[in-house]
Image (cartoon, rainbow, N blue to C red):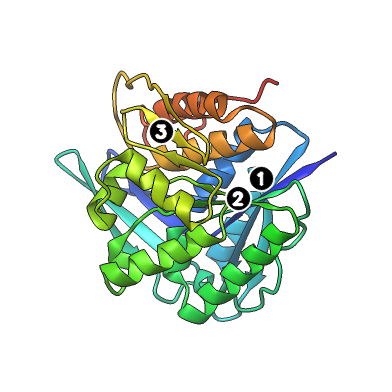
Amino acid sequence: MTRQFLSIGECMIEMAPRADGSYSMGFAGDTFNTAWYARRVAGPDLEIGYLSAVGDDGPSQEMTTFMREAGVRPELAVRPGRAVGLYMISLIEGERSFSYWRSTSAATTLADDLDRLPGLGAGDMAFFSGITLAILPESGREKLLAALAKARAEGVTVAFDPNLRPRLWSGTEDMCRWIMRGAEVADIALPSYEDEGAHFGDADKAATGARYLSAGAQLVIVKDGPLPVLLVTPEAENLVETVPAEQVVDTTAAGDSFNARFLVGVLSGETATVAAAQACGLSRQVIGAHGALVESASAPITG
Protein backbone atom coordinates (compact mmCIF):
# COMPACT_ATOMS: atom_id res chain seq x y z
CA MET A 1 0.00 0.00 0.00
CA THR A 2 1.32 3.42 -0.97
CA ARG A 3 1.59 5.92 1.87
CA GLN A 4 1.75 9.69 1.62
CA PHE A 5 4.17 12.21 3.13
CA LEU A 6 2.98 15.79 2.63
CA SER A 7 5.26 18.72 3.47
CA ILE A 8 3.68 22.17 3.83
CA GLY A 9 5.33 25.58 3.51
CA GLU A 10 7.22 27.90 1.18
CA CYS A 11 9.69 27.03 -1.55
CA MET A 12 11.71 30.01 -2.78
CA ILE A 13 14.07 30.95 -5.56
CA GLU A 14 17.63 30.67 -4.27
CA MET A 15 20.37 32.85 -5.76
CA ALA A 16 23.71 31.38 -4.71
CA PRO A 17 27.12 32.92 -5.45
CA ARG A 18 29.58 31.21 -7.77
CA ALA A 19 33.35 31.46 -7.54
CA ASP A 20 33.46 33.81 -10.55
CA GLY A 21 31.16 36.32 -8.88
CA SER A 22 28.02 35.37 -10.80
CA TYR A 23 24.98 33.69 -9.25
CA SER A 24 23.24 30.39 -9.90
CA MET A 25 19.49 30.00 -9.51
CA GLY A 26 17.91 27.12 -7.66
CA PHE A 27 14.91 26.36 -5.46
CA ALA A 28 14.93 25.73 -1.71
CA GLY A 29 13.13 26.39 1.56
CA ASP A 30 13.01 24.53 4.86
CA THR A 31 9.96 22.33 4.31
CA PHE A 32 10.71 21.83 0.62
CA ASN A 33 14.25 20.75 1.48
CA THR A 34 12.71 18.15 3.78
CA ALA A 35 10.41 16.94 0.99
CA TRP A 36 13.35 16.75 -1.44
CA TYR A 37 15.46 14.67 0.93
CA ALA A 38 12.45 12.55 1.87
CA ARG A 39 12.07 11.58 -1.78
CA ARG A 40 15.75 10.63 -1.99
CA VAL A 41 15.68 8.32 1.03
CA ALA A 42 12.15 6.87 0.76
CA GLY A 43 11.21 3.69 -1.01
CA PRO A 44 8.79 3.50 -3.95
CA ASP A 45 5.86 2.76 -1.63
CA LEU A 46 6.00 6.28 -0.14
CA GLU A 47 4.70 9.21 -2.21
CA ILE A 48 6.09 12.66 -1.37
CA GLY A 49 3.97 15.77 -1.88
CA TYR A 50 4.50 19.49 -1.31
CA LEU A 51 1.64 21.84 -0.41
CA SER A 52 2.09 25.54 -1.08
CA ALA A 53 0.99 28.32 -3.44
CA VAL A 54 2.78 29.82 -6.44
CA GLY A 55 2.17 32.57 -8.96
CA ASP A 56 1.44 32.35 -12.67
CA ASP A 57 4.82 33.68 -13.79
CA GLY A 58 7.79 31.93 -15.36
CA PRO A 59 9.75 31.21 -12.15
CA SER A 60 6.63 29.68 -10.58
CA GLN A 61 6.31 27.34 -13.55
CA GLU A 62 10.01 26.47 -13.35
CA MET A 63 9.63 25.70 -9.63
CA THR A 64 6.69 23.41 -10.32
CA THR A 65 8.67 21.57 -13.00
CA PHE A 66 11.65 21.26 -10.65
CA MET A 67 9.47 19.62 -8.01
CA ARG A 68 8.03 17.11 -10.46
CA GLU A 69 11.47 16.24 -11.82
CA ALA A 70 12.69 15.69 -8.25
CA GLY A 71 9.87 13.19 -7.68
CA VAL A 72 7.89 15.49 -5.40
CA ARG A 73 4.19 15.81 -6.23
CA PRO A 74 3.21 19.51 -6.40
CA GLU A 75 0.05 20.39 -4.46
CA LEU A 76 0.23 24.04 -5.46
CA ALA A 77 -2.52 26.62 -5.61
CA VAL A 78 -1.87 29.09 -8.45
CA ARG A 79 -2.43 32.75 -7.56
CA PRO A 80 -2.67 34.95 -10.70
CA GLY A 81 -0.56 38.09 -10.48
CA ARG A 82 1.57 36.71 -7.64
CA ALA A 83 5.13 35.39 -7.67
CA VAL A 84 7.28 33.15 -5.51
CA GLY A 85 9.67 34.47 -2.87
CA LEU A 86 13.40 34.88 -3.46
CA TYR A 87 16.49 34.90 -1.30
CA MET A 88 20.08 35.76 -2.13
CA ILE A 89 23.14 34.34 -0.41
CA SER A 90 26.11 36.65 0.14
CA LEU A 91 29.51 35.22 1.00
CA ILE A 92 31.92 37.57 2.79
CA GLU A 93 35.20 36.11 4.08
CA GLY A 94 33.63 32.67 4.22
CA GLU A 95 30.57 33.77 6.18
CA ARG A 96 27.13 33.41 4.59
CA SER A 97 24.40 35.99 4.98
CA PHE A 98 20.91 36.04 3.49
CA SER A 99 18.71 38.72 1.95
CA TYR A 100 15.01 37.93 1.43
CA TRP A 101 12.27 39.19 -0.89
CA ARG A 102 9.14 37.34 0.17
CA SER A 103 6.56 39.88 1.42
CA THR A 104 4.34 39.35 -1.65
CA SER A 105 5.08 35.64 -2.02
CA ALA A 106 2.16 33.53 -3.20
CA ALA A 107 3.00 31.06 -0.42
CA THR A 108 1.53 33.48 2.13
CA THR A 109 -1.87 32.49 0.71
CA LEU A 110 -1.37 28.71 0.86
CA ALA A 111 -4.11 28.27 3.47
CA ASP A 112 -6.69 30.56 1.86
CA ASP A 113 -8.76 27.75 0.34
CA LEU A 114 -7.63 25.00 2.70
CA ASP A 115 -10.41 23.06 4.41
CA ARG A 116 -8.57 19.76 4.60
CA LEU A 117 -5.19 18.37 3.59
CA PRO A 118 -5.39 16.80 0.10
CA GLY A 119 -4.93 13.10 -0.40
CA LEU A 120 -4.10 12.11 3.19
CA GLY A 121 -5.66 9.33 5.25
CA ALA A 122 -4.91 7.15 8.24
CA GLY A 123 -1.27 6.05 8.26
CA ASP A 124 -0.01 9.02 6.25
CA MET A 125 2.08 11.94 7.53
CA ALA A 126 1.90 15.73 7.25
CA PHE A 127 4.85 17.99 8.09
CA PHE A 128 5.02 21.74 8.68
CA SER A 129 7.30 24.21 10.42
CA GLY A 130 7.39 27.42 12.40
CA ILE A 131 8.38 29.18 9.19
CA THR A 132 5.20 27.85 7.57
CA LEU A 133 3.21 29.55 10.32
CA ALA A 134 5.33 32.72 10.31
CA ILE A 135 4.70 33.60 6.66
CA LEU A 136 0.91 33.30 6.98
CA PRO A 137 -1.51 35.95 8.21
CA GLU A 138 -3.28 35.03 11.45
CA SER A 139 -6.36 33.85 9.57
CA GLY A 140 -4.17 31.56 7.47
CA ARG A 141 -2.48 30.14 10.56
CA GLU A 142 -5.86 29.33 12.07
CA LYS A 143 -7.05 27.62 8.89
CA LEU A 144 -3.87 25.57 8.54
CA LEU A 145 -3.92 24.46 12.18
CA ALA A 146 -7.58 23.52 11.88
CA ALA A 147 -6.85 21.41 8.78
CA LEU A 148 -3.93 19.72 10.54
CA ALA A 149 -6.04 19.01 13.63
CA LYS A 150 -8.75 17.49 11.44
CA ALA A 151 -6.20 15.32 9.64
CA ARG A 152 -4.73 14.19 12.96
CA ALA A 153 -8.17 13.20 14.22
CA GLU A 154 -8.56 11.06 11.08
CA GLY A 155 -5.34 9.13 11.74
CA VAL A 156 -2.73 11.23 9.94
CA THR A 157 0.52 11.65 11.88
CA VAL A 158 1.40 15.35 12.13
CA ALA A 159 5.06 16.37 12.51
CA PHE A 160 6.28 19.87 13.38
CA ASP A 161 9.70 21.54 13.37
CA PRO A 162 9.42 24.85 15.32
CA ASN A 163 12.34 26.26 13.28
CA LEU A 164 12.41 29.52 15.23
CA ARG A 165 13.15 32.57 13.06
CA PRO A 166 12.52 35.74 15.11
CA ARG A 167 12.96 38.06 12.12
CA LEU A 168 9.80 36.60 10.55
CA TRP A 169 7.63 37.45 13.55
CA SER A 170 6.34 40.70 15.05
CA GLY A 171 8.08 39.86 18.34
CA THR A 172 9.34 37.02 20.53
CA GLU A 173 6.09 36.72 22.48
CA ASP A 174 4.07 36.39 19.28
CA MET A 175 6.50 33.81 17.91
CA CYS A 176 6.47 31.68 21.05
CA ARG A 177 2.68 31.77 21.31
CA TRP A 178 2.14 30.57 17.75
CA ILE A 179 4.90 27.98 17.96
CA MET A 180 3.13 26.37 20.90
CA ARG A 181 -0.17 26.59 19.03
CA GLY A 182 1.54 24.63 16.27
CA ALA A 183 2.82 22.11 18.79
CA GLU A 184 -0.73 21.46 20.00
CA VAL A 185 -1.69 19.78 16.71
CA ALA A 186 1.52 17.71 16.39
CA ASP A 187 2.22 14.07 17.22
CA ILE A 188 5.96 14.54 16.59
CA ALA A 189 7.98 17.67 17.41
CA LEU A 190 11.54 18.25 16.16
CA PRO A 191 12.91 21.32 17.99
CA SER A 192 16.54 22.49 18.07
CA TYR A 193 17.79 23.10 21.58
CA GLU A 194 20.00 26.10 20.79
CA ASP A 195 17.00 28.07 19.54
CA GLU A 196 14.57 26.76 22.14
CA GLY A 197 16.89 27.56 25.03
CA ALA A 198 17.45 31.07 23.72
CA HIS A 199 13.80 31.96 23.15
CA PHE A 200 11.86 29.81 25.61
CA GLY A 201 14.47 29.78 28.38
CA ASP A 202 14.74 25.98 28.58
CA ALA A 203 17.51 24.96 30.97
CA ASP A 204 18.40 21.80 29.04
CA LYS A 205 17.20 19.46 26.31
CA ALA A 206 15.00 17.56 28.74
CA ALA A 207 13.12 20.77 29.53
CA THR A 208 12.54 21.37 25.82
CA GLY A 209 11.25 17.83 25.42
CA ALA A 210 8.95 18.14 28.42
CA ARG A 211 7.44 21.39 27.14
CA TYR A 212 6.50 19.88 23.79
CA LEU A 213 5.13 16.75 25.46
CA SER A 214 2.92 18.93 27.64
CA ALA A 215 1.61 20.62 24.47
CA GLY A 216 0.42 17.25 23.17
CA ALA A 217 3.28 15.63 21.24
CA GLN A 218 3.85 11.91 21.75
CA LEU A 219 7.45 11.97 20.50
CA VAL A 220 9.93 14.83 20.73
CA ILE A 221 13.33 14.79 19.01
CA VAL A 222 15.53 17.53 20.43
CA LYS A 223 18.38 18.30 18.04
CA ASP A 224 21.51 19.97 19.38
CA GLY A 225 24.01 20.59 16.59
CA PRO A 226 26.90 18.09 16.83
CA LEU A 227 25.83 16.97 20.33
CA PRO A 228 23.66 13.92 21.07
CA VAL A 229 20.01 13.97 20.02
CA LEU A 230 17.47 13.52 22.83
CA LEU A 231 14.38 11.41 22.14
CA VAL A 232 11.55 12.04 24.59
CA THR A 233 8.24 10.18 24.95
CA PRO A 234 5.76 10.19 27.84
CA GLU A 235 7.43 7.00 29.07
CA ALA A 236 11.17 7.58 28.63
CA GLU A 237 14.12 9.65 27.46
CA ASN A 238 16.90 8.31 25.24
CA LEU A 239 20.12 9.93 24.01
CA VAL A 240 21.31 9.09 20.50
CA GLU A 241 25.02 9.74 20.07
CA THR A 242 26.24 11.57 16.98
CA VAL A 243 29.47 11.34 15.00
CA PRO A 244 30.97 14.80 14.35
CA ALA A 245 31.38 15.81 10.72
CA GLU A 246 34.95 15.73 9.43
CA GLN A 247 34.42 19.12 7.81
CA VAL A 248 31.54 21.58 8.12
CA VAL A 249 31.11 23.39 4.81
CA ASP A 250 27.49 24.59 4.84
CA THR A 251 24.87 24.01 7.55
CA THR A 252 21.94 25.36 5.51
CA ALA A 253 19.88 22.16 5.38
CA ALA A 254 21.29 20.28 8.37
CA GLY A 255 17.99 20.18 10.22
CA ASP A 256 15.86 19.81 7.09
CA SER A 257 17.70 16.69 5.97
CA PHE A 258 17.63 15.27 9.51
CA ASN A 259 13.87 15.76 9.61
CA ALA A 260 13.43 14.01 6.26
CA ARG A 261 15.39 10.89 7.17
CA PHE A 262 13.92 10.65 10.66
CA LEU A 263 10.29 11.06 9.60
CA VAL A 264 10.54 8.76 6.59
CA GLY A 265 12.28 6.21 8.79
CA VAL A 266 9.54 6.27 11.42
CA LEU A 267 6.83 6.20 8.75
CA SER A 268 8.55 3.19 7.19
CA GLY A 269 8.64 1.24 10.46
CA GLU A 270 12.06 2.02 11.92
CA THR A 271 12.33 2.64 15.65
CA ALA A 272 12.86 6.25 16.66
CA THR A 273 16.38 5.41 17.83
CA VAL A 274 17.39 3.82 14.52
CA ALA A 275 15.74 6.59 12.52
CA ALA A 276 17.52 9.28 14.56
CA ALA A 277 20.91 7.63 14.10
CA GLN A 278 20.36 7.39 10.34
CA ALA A 279 19.13 10.99 10.26
CA CYS A 280 22.31 12.16 11.95
CA GLY A 281 24.29 10.34 9.28
CA LEU A 282 22.43 12.04 6.44
CA SER A 283 22.75 15.46 8.06
CA ARG A 284 26.48 14.90 8.49
CA GLN A 285 26.84 14.32 4.74
CA VAL A 286 24.76 17.40 3.91
CA ILE A 287 26.80 19.83 6.01
CA GLY A 288 29.98 18.57 4.37
CA ALA A 289 28.95 20.01 1.00
CA HIS A 290 27.74 23.32 -0.41
CA GLY A 291 24.07 24.10 -0.91
CA ALA A 292 20.71 23.17 0.56
CA LEU A 293 20.12 20.22 -1.79
CA VAL A 294 23.11 17.88 -1.90
CA GLU A 295 22.82 15.32 -4.71
CA SER A 296 25.51 13.04 -3.29
CA ALA A 297 23.93 12.70 0.17
CA SER A 298 22.17 9.39 0.78
CA ALA A 299 20.80 7.32 3.65
CA PRO A 300 18.10 5.13 2.07
CA ILE A 301 15.55 3.10 3.98
CA THR A 302 16.71 -0.51 3.81
CA GLY A 303 14.09 -2.32 5.87
- Give me the residue at 37% from left, 53% from top: 15
Give the percent coordinates (x, y) of residue 288: 36, 27
Q: Which residue is mark 3?
A: 230
Q: Secondary structure at mark 3?
A: strand
Q: Residue at x 52, y 81 (%)?
A: 139
Q: Residue at x 58, y 69 (%)?
A: 144
The residue where tag 1 is placed is 69
The answer to whether the residue labelled 1 contacts the one labelled 2, judged by CB atoms less than 8 Å apart, is yes
Q: Earlier in the sequence, mark 1 or mark 3?
A: 1
What type is the residue that disc 3 sits on?
Answer: Leu
Say whether marks 1 and 3 touch (CB < 8 Å): no
> Which residue appears at 33% of the width and 39% of the height?
205
Secondary structure at numbered mark 1: helix
Binning the other alpha carbons within 10 Å of mark 2 as few (below 14), some (14 to 19) or many (20 upward) gives: some
Mark 1: amino acid: Glu
Q: Which mark is residue 66?
A: 2
Residue 225 place in picture, x, y as percent: 32, 34
- Residue situated furthest right in the rendering: 1
In the rendering, at what x and y percent does residue 21 appear? 26, 46
As displayed, is residue 140 above or below residue 66?
below
